[in-house]
Amino acid sequence: MRASGIDRVFERRLAALINSRESTVLRGGLKGVEKESLRVRPDGTIAGTPHPAALGSALTHAYITTDYSEALTELVTPTFRESWELLQFLCDLHQFVYRHLGDELLWATSMPCVVDGDASIPIARFGSSNVGRMKEVYRLGLGHRYGRMMQAISGVHFNYSFPAHFWSVLADVLQQHETGQDFISAQYFALLRNYRRYGWLILYLFGNSPALCSSFVKGREHSLHELSRGTLYEPYATSLRMSDLGYRNKSQAGVQISVNSLAEYVRDLTAAVSTPHPDYEKIGVKVDGEYRQLNANLLQIENEYYSYIRPKRVARSGEHPSQALQRAGVEYVEFRALDVSAFDPVGVNQNKLRFVEAFAALCVLKASEPIDFNEQSALDANHAVVAHRGREPGLQLNRDGRPIELARWAHELIDSMRGVCELLDAGDPQRPYTAALELQEAKVNDVALTPSARTLVELRSTGESFAQMALRMSRIHKAYFLDLHPPNEQRLAEFSAQAEASLEKQAAIERADRIGFDEYLARYLGRDRGA
């Protein structure tokens, strides 16, 4: 039972994994990162300029794109087996981008710069092709539904897949005879359920948005306190980004997506993208010849569903995410709750990535029963309270219907991860995963070491507003990348070539369109209904 504090099932599974004589059973999982940053002017206001042409096409470039806003740059790495390789690539990407930003900067924090209402946030544009127009209309719909302010928030997404050789060993541990894709998908869904149970720990350890610029909530009701002129905060917050002020907004409260199985997940997503919503019907879809949203359903498309973690499969051209999952099962998971770290030039660091990798193994090895509606409500409440009050002394969470101190539960989870980290270290004398675990344990022992606490200390000690501090850090990061020597000229040249090729690819897509946008959209959305 989880309530006892000792998970006997997990202990048996970990022991069996250790005794499997596969010393590298957890080594070599594939890791990738998607890192978002607002482009801002030198004065720290959001950039109104187009996505720089020298960075290539946001529609077709594999590594450099935009998210909701034209100013919301997104850098995407390929997958690597080692975290240091991933971060080196991400560093090279930043260096390339900064060579083509002129006097603009990449904002160093998750919560936005000074903004002047929704109208100040430009929606991303992807050219005149049907697929490009669809991406733009989807974003218009998000703005109408949730407001553009929420879409100006940045985050770091960590994509992870276990090494292929792990699954046969795990099947032996679980005494399962089938080791094919159905087994792999089922284990990833076990991970998803346990992340919903324990993912609050990620917010406590890595949340770095306890404060924000007052312009973010101008004209909206909130319960934030004033820290200084222009800065609002919550005294014990860890991640306002992942609270109801940010992504966990009330607008999607009615979207319940089960992760009890792949079949249930697809069933619920399919229902959400095909069920009309009265409030969205009032917005209208095509009004006076202009699209306001793709449709008036609970979700326009599947990616509109905001979640802490997603099951993923690389989709084929024109394929919906759930269709890709149905076709070939879960390929990897996307951890979406990481705030951008103002203390790291690329927004993330190796210790964070190593901890999340070990945490993924913890979640797949622990017992993972189906989650019913009542349990899901309690789990959502745990995440919400940690986002708002995670550093509050003596804070209690709900575990299996009983109160438990956050610190005690966090220690239990970290203790369970020691054996996992030993497997991930696999004879490395530097013991990097164990070292990463010890750094996080220190944050549980001393709340002052958490990034959210460090941010508030920085604001108080300097007397800066949130916007002033974030702008200062953004300038420091820009100088770091522009002064970095020696630059990887070969990789930077490759990025330039890829940028040119992506522009040519976008132009080819635009030339190849043979049908109008109305017909294109009807065909695309028809696939949601099985057409």
Image (spheres, rainbow, N blue to C red):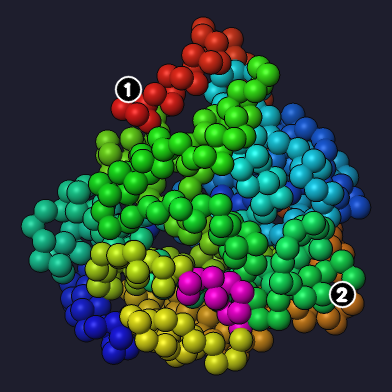
* Span shown in magenta: 381-391
Between 183 and 243, the one nearer to me in the picture = 243
In-image side of 308 versus 465 (left or right) = left
Apparent side of residue 303 relative to residue 118 in the rendered image (left or right): left
SS at badge 2: strand
Is any part of residue 373 visible from this angle? yes
Q: Amino acid at mark 2?
A: Ser
Q: Main secondary structure of the magenta part?
A: helix
Marks 2,1: beta carbons within 8 A:
no
Query: Is residue 364 found left or right of 195 in the rendered image?
Result: left
Depicted 425 relative to depicted 221: above or below:
below
Q: Is residue 332 left or right of residue 66?
A: left
Residues at marks 2 and 1, CA–CA distance in whole angstroms = 55 Å
Q: Which quadrant is the N terminus positioned in?
A: bottom left
| Quadrant of the rendered image containing residue 55 | top right
Within 10 Å of disc 1 (Cα), the crowding (few <14, some 14-19, many 20+) is few
Residue 263 percent location from the top left of the image: 25, 46
Question: What residue type is disc 1 on?
Answer: Ala
Percent of width and height locating residue 19? 18, 77
Residue at figure coordinates x 49%, y 14% from the top left: 519
Q: Residue at x 86, y 41 (%)?
A: 102
Residue at numbered disc 2: 228
Circle nearer the N terminus (2, 1): 2
Relative to 219, is 173 above or below? Answer: below
Residue nearer the viewer, 115 or 487: 115
Residue assigned mark 1: 531
Q: Is residue 484 visible?
A: no
Q: Secondary structure at mark 1?
A: loop
Q: Which mark is residue 78?
A: none
